[in-house]
Amino acid sequence: MELNYGPEYDDFRAEVRHFCETEGKKTKSGALRMGENRPSQAAIDWQGQLIEAGYTARTIPKEYGGYGGTADIVKSLIIQEEFVASGTRSGIQNQGISMLVPTLLEVGTEEQKLKYIKPTINGEMIWAQGYSEPGSGSDLASLKTKGVVEGDNFVINGQKIWTSSAQYADMCFILVRTEPEAPKHHGISYLLMDMKTTGIDIKPLVTMTGDAFFNEMFISDVKVPVTSIVGQRGEGWRVANVTLKYERGMIGNPGMSAMGIRGVADLMEEETISGIRAMDMPVYRDRLLKLQGRSLANKYHGLRLLSNEINKEGMGVEGLIVKLSATYLSHEIYSLAVDVMGEFGTLYDGSAYQRQKDWMRQYLGSFMGIIGGGTSQIQKNVISERGLGLPREPLVKLDQNGWELIKK
Amino acid sequence: MRFGLSEEQTMLSDMLNKYLVANLPLDVVRASSEQTLHHNQEIWSGLLDQGIHSILIPEDYGGAGLSMLHSEVVSETLGKHIVPVSYLSNAVLSPLAILYAGSESQKEQLLPELASGSTSFGIALTDVVANRENTKLEINGNKVSGSATFIMAGENADKLILAAPGTLLIVDTKAAGVTMERLNTVDKTRDFSAVTLKDAPCELLGEIGSADDAIEKLLNAARISIAADSLGAADAMFNQALAYSRERFQFDRPIGSFQSIKHILAEMITDLEPCRSLLWYAAYAYDEVEDEAKLVACHAKAHISEMAKHVGRATTELHGGMGFTDLLGLHFWFKRIEVNRQLLGGPELQRHNAAVAQGWAPNAITAA
């Protein structure tokens, strides 16, 4: 056990701290909410400053608009720690930056890298994700949106759902069935579609929080140049999995729950029930402590995974469990906050008497984590099949005579 | 930066595991469980040869002077094999009690005896954690009267370490005025007893009222060690569940191909792996991060008790009717986990103490 990063990082930390205390102080804090809007000019300027200093897009090569630093997870961690500790505004976070850019770096053509990475990391080009379809959620590979080659274009027809950011995105990375004769995992292509093309119709999809982060996207005869394919025809599933790997990392951040625990503890010290602070009532307090126990376990588990990564020790089942554990934990933390406020916890839409912090919105929004990026049930399949080596559920055929197992 | 076990700690665990696989199959545990005294002397001697009893004793007193994380690794491995000896009493709590509370001459005399295994100790802390029988120890010079419950490994010990609020003392089990009484718990892999004392000769560890800090540290050591024992036991149960789900066929399929079963196993491992990370940190903090030590030790005991209980239930259930039988013997692990859960304070009490440690609750439930 050696929890120091080592003296060689002290200078780097001092440099980051100095930046936060000088440049950081000049910016207004407050990050963009997920899917809310395009970044402001101020955010884009700040992003430029961060890239130049090497505090975001750190490992992206210079020729694609990044800082061009070597991968050093400890340095990334120090940047994150210092920004959080000083309340410095972080860089722009969106799915173009976290998902598309790593995918292009891994499998994109040189031309695609040169064209798309720079404006994306600058915050100027916004991407939508065109994966899920009404009939293809957990079984994403069964997707039906068609792409047929006509001349220099794929002509695309179909419907996508859960397309976040589509109402203002410039581009969309989209999965399309281009080889209908091939087995389902081998018939998909990964395309980059310009959202201004004729034939794209966007309808906001309002969720239970009342927000419309997501959309339905209807695609009729949309032409996408054949050069916009990432990877080869029929290889889209593999390319998409590169992206999904980055999405899983995004959703399962164990540090999130520590902030939630701190927030509920503060709430419980403020809220009183008939004159007694919630924190002084053992029934509420024990729930808080129970969640804190799990939160701490996840926090140190995060350190262990980080250590595995730094020391290149490889990852077994312990790396697959993070999302399942962290997303349920968040749900329970927000649920406790609502319970502590009782009836007042249900106040919404800026109602009279509503508390400043919108715990109900967080509580409802926690389903995004539980369901998005593979539901908890899919996570359990992944953990048990890939992590524990258990067999897949056998396939079943259903016809008028009932169902039977398909024997391979 | 490195968060995890060192090579040395991994080797320690492997070595011990190898010894226990070879020497402690379930029928040996079962045979011990059928004796009045469950302590297995042969296994204890074998473990003495492995040197695990002197891990926490400083080199100056004949020990190995290793860390709590080394000891945690041992506790976890012993829990995995439901070992019928008391490492906790003889190698963790008794030496640390002497080290933290004893005078220099007591350390010089007693620690080498523990390090060589020539003297065995039982220890009782239950009554200062949560006193349910209104027991008391009245100390009068070098005599003590009163009673204590839930002494660990006291029956076959040469000496007992007993705790009154703020004070630790030693009595000889064979001395006049000392009456031991066996307590039979549901767990037949460990021995507990109570003692009644009538003007029994005693030796104070340090001075009267001077052991508050020592008791506080001992409780943290106990929380970590007991949590480790439970994690080891839960891990063993999980592995049996996983193996069984692959070999048991129903409806022409291994039951591990049913999602209802796979998902239970996925939940178990999702609960268990972060427990290990928490426990490693708790053991590290015990030695290195004083102001977090109590908080994480309490949380480790509470959280691991809860997760191990879930694993115990799910594993038993997953084995169907066989899980409930004596024949299969899963109950040995289940009961070990259950006794660990209650030992020196169940999850509710541990969480309460964790709340106190953060200033969230007014008073700690320990008389210490």
Image (tube, rainbow, N blue to C red):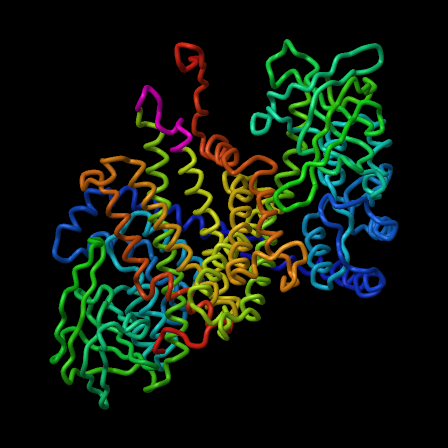
Which residue occupies 40% across, 74% down?
B364
Left or right side of B304 for A292: right
Residue B264 is situated, as x and y percent measured from the top left of the image, at 40, 38
Instruction: Name the one closer to the observer, B78 or A23.
Output: A23
Give the position of the N terminus of chain B as an image quadrant: bottom right
Q: Is residue B105 visible?
A: no
Q: Is residue A173 left or right of residue A393?
A: right
Instruction: Note whether B359 is above or below B12 in the view shown.
Output: below
How many numbered discs, if any? 0
Quadrant hosting residue B345: bottom left
User: From the image, which quarter does the C terminus of chain B lie in?
Assistant: bottom left
* In the image: residue A398, left or right of residue A14: left
> Looking at the image, can residue A300 be seen?
yes
Is residue A342 or residue A190 the one in the foreground?
Answer: A342
Residue at the far front in the pictured view: A352
Residue B252 falls within the magenta-colored stretch: yes
Provide the residue span drawn in magenta.
B250-261
Q: Residue at x 75, y 38 (%)?
A: A165
Residue in front for this viewpoint, A394 or B88 = A394
**Would residue B338 be counted in the magenta stretch?**
no
Q: Residue at x 30, y 47 (%)?
A: B81
Residue A180's spot in the image, x, y percent? 65, 11
User: Could you say which is closer to the camera, residue A345 or residue A136?
Assistant: A345
* Image x and y of residue A233, in percent: 72, 16
In the image, residue B82 above or below residue B129: above
Q: Where on the picture, by quarter, is residue A129? A: top right
Task: Tell me if residue A231 comes above or below residue A40 in the rendering.
Answer: above
Q: Compared to A141, does B123 lie above or below?
A: below
**Picture coordinates of residue A164, whole percent (x, y):** 71, 37
